[in-house]
Amino acid sequence: MQQEYSSNAKSYLRTLAVTLLAGSLFACGGSNSNPFPDDPGGGDNDPDPTPESVELGFSVQTYGGARLSDVSVTLGEDTAQSDDDGYVLFSLPSQDTYVVRAEADGFITQALKVDGEADGITPIRLTAVKQTLSLADIEAPRTLSANDLGARITFPADAFVTPDGEPATGSATVQITPWDITNGELTAMPGNGQAIDAAGDAVELISAGMLTVDIHNADGDYLQLSPGATAEIQMDLPVASINNEALSVGSTIPMWHFDEAQGEWVEDDSIMGTVVQSPTSPVGLAVYAEVSHFSTWNWDFKFVYGGSIHVECRLEDNSATPCGIGAEVILDDGSMFSRNGHLPAGGSTIINMPNSATIHWSATSAGGLIGEQTTDMSGDVVIELGEPDSSNHVRCLLPDETPVACSVTLTDGVHSLTQAVPAAGANIVTAWPNLDEHTELEWVAETPAPISHGGQQVLAEGVATSGITGNVDIALDTTPIDDVEVQCQSANGTVIPCLVDFVAIAPNGDQVSESDVYIQSDVSIAIPSASTLIQWSAESDGAYSQNGQFVLLAGSMETGLVSSVILVLDEEVVQGPAAQSVEVFCTNSQDTAATSCDIEAYVEGSRAGYAMLGSFDDVLVGESVTLEFPEGMSSDGEWVQLMATGDDGSQTSSFSPYGSLNDGESIELELQCAHGANGGNCP
């Protein structure tokens, strides 16, 4: 039997003492063994008899805590819709565990394993799908680039099959969602992070990156990679270390995929993720893997720590109460993980925690009570629950009043909060103090990615004000995207002059193309605003040094119509050897008597401008120094200038085309008094 979360059920569960879900409280990571004491609240140690039925309640939220209504929640054979406060309640026979599944348009499906023998309320957090690309020919090979976090997927020709095993052809939609491991999105990690490693053991995880890819054909069938086919996936690392361990190019990371049927992560020891260079990452690094099927993939390390902390929820009268709880844990190096679950009255001691961290706690109870707190690991945590200080149902509306998904930032002038809001809207609540009927809340909304409106791809934004309760409809103004800022970069992030071809495709099949667009540094290219898919290809304007060779660089990818694009030229065609370093030394001419010299080296050219390559002081005459050249120097159009000044005031200089230099060759700089600063009279 299922039912919507009634006020009577809320009152009942507000005072109900619940038992912690085994392993559900800690994600990014989980365990199938209960990490809490058997008797966290004290009292009789004898186990209670298993009840014949249980009341399992769920609070459906975005990853930021906005409450979602009309989400379809399935538990066992029963399905119910979340109410206006995001709650749903099931009354059903007791059993060891259930897998609960939550589905809503525009969101990644959530599934998690829950204890089926104890009454309780558990948060279900959802993350919105970030981007959808429409393809006319899924059978073609391609690289798709997402708007966020440098995410890319590459697959070969004829890579997909339908559920009945037939080759997939024709139109398809590709949903790409890279998860940001630094902004709280991991609070909605599928399965609350419960994981099973390759040895079959329950473990907890800490993520270095997570990517969800879903592909459907025109009939809505889910497409999967065909047997034997593989695809490449990649996304940027926003931090250079995970769990206080530094990462670098070549570091390896175990790979895990999410099993929706079981509600847990499974390690795939047949593949290994690696860390690679990325020009779009703030730390220059990305995670990469080659996979044999699509789902949600996770680059994860096992998380083992010896810390613990006791956490409980109390009402305003200081009485203990059960609650659903989320913890966003920020380690000292900035890497993060999160955990969700529920606590019994009196709380529990949470184990496998870091010894040092900042933790943002959020809690909710039946009846809609909420509480928030930020702590370190130094002592017990008590979260006080109360009625929300503000509660507003928020929607974003386009000029024709069509609802649209948006990102909303709310402020009261002191506090601020950013939430993802689906097209249907969400109930946003706060626990901010000192709000009253005179408080004016300010709302700023935007579409974080381009959307289709009126036959165009547009960005939309708007503002609104409100009181602390009531509906808030934010009217958005739209701005068509009709040009794209384009830049070419090598794999190591060097800006490369290039020649670009593009094909812009509209939903009706209309195409606009242009070839050999020259880009020196970056350029704005006009693109019809009706375009939804842009096919880009580019090649470098000449050869560049890479790993001791001159190579021509090329690259191709497909994107939606976005405001800016970086075309990564990561395909190389070798042209010949390139100098990585040369030896430089000073000698005296007949009229000089220097014992040492100072040497300076510069690169000059239309691409590089004029920049120093290196300097060497007090180099003994006749002894050489090594001048190393950076990657990415052009074989044509860049010159190396060497200048030397002797300790007797003599000077000399030389110019050489970089492409004419041989690796390791010696360059002599003969000092001349006539070139000195004293008009030819060396001291």
Image (cartoon, rainbow, N blue to C red):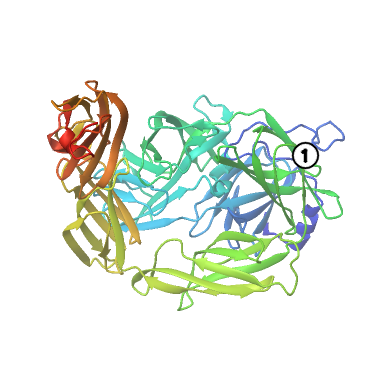
Q: Residue 147 falls in which quadrant of the image?
A: bottom left
- Residue lying furthest top in this view? 623
Give the position of the C terminus as an image quadrant.
top left
**Image quadrant occupied by the N terminus:** bottom right
Please report the residue visible at 57 percent of the width from the left and 60 percent of the height from the top: 419
Q: Residue at x 71, y 72 (%)?
A: 439
Residue 487 vs residue 562, the one in the foreground: 487
Q: Give the farthest residue toward the bottom.
A: 400
Q: Residue at x 76, y 61 (%)?
A: 387
Residue 481 lies, in percent from the top left, at 34, 68
Q: Could you tell me residue 27's position as x and y percent?
A: 59, 40
Q: In the image, is residue 50 above or below residue 588?
A: below
- The residue that label 1 is drawn on is 380
Q: Amino acid at mark 1?
A: Asp
Residue 554 at what x, y percent from top left? 21, 45
**How many residues crowd around disc 1 within 10 Å: few (fewer than 14), some, or many (20 or more)?**
few
Q: Is residue 528 left or right of residue 249?
A: left
Q: Is residue 85 left or right of residue 255?
A: right
Nearer-the-camera pick, 683 or 592: 683
Provide the secondary structure element on which disc 1 rests: loop
Q: Which is more toward the observer, 70 or 392?
A: 392
Q: Give the image quarter of residue 455.
A: bottom left
- How many numbered marks, from 0 up? 1
Going by the image, does 480 lie left or right of 508? right
Task: Kindly tell me whether residue 124 is visible in this rendering.
Answer: yes
| Vertical arrangement, residue 264 with respect to residue 533, above or below | above
Q: Does the rendering let one see residue 67?
A: no
In percent of width and height, residue 509 lies at 24, 65
Front position in the image: 350 or 660: 660
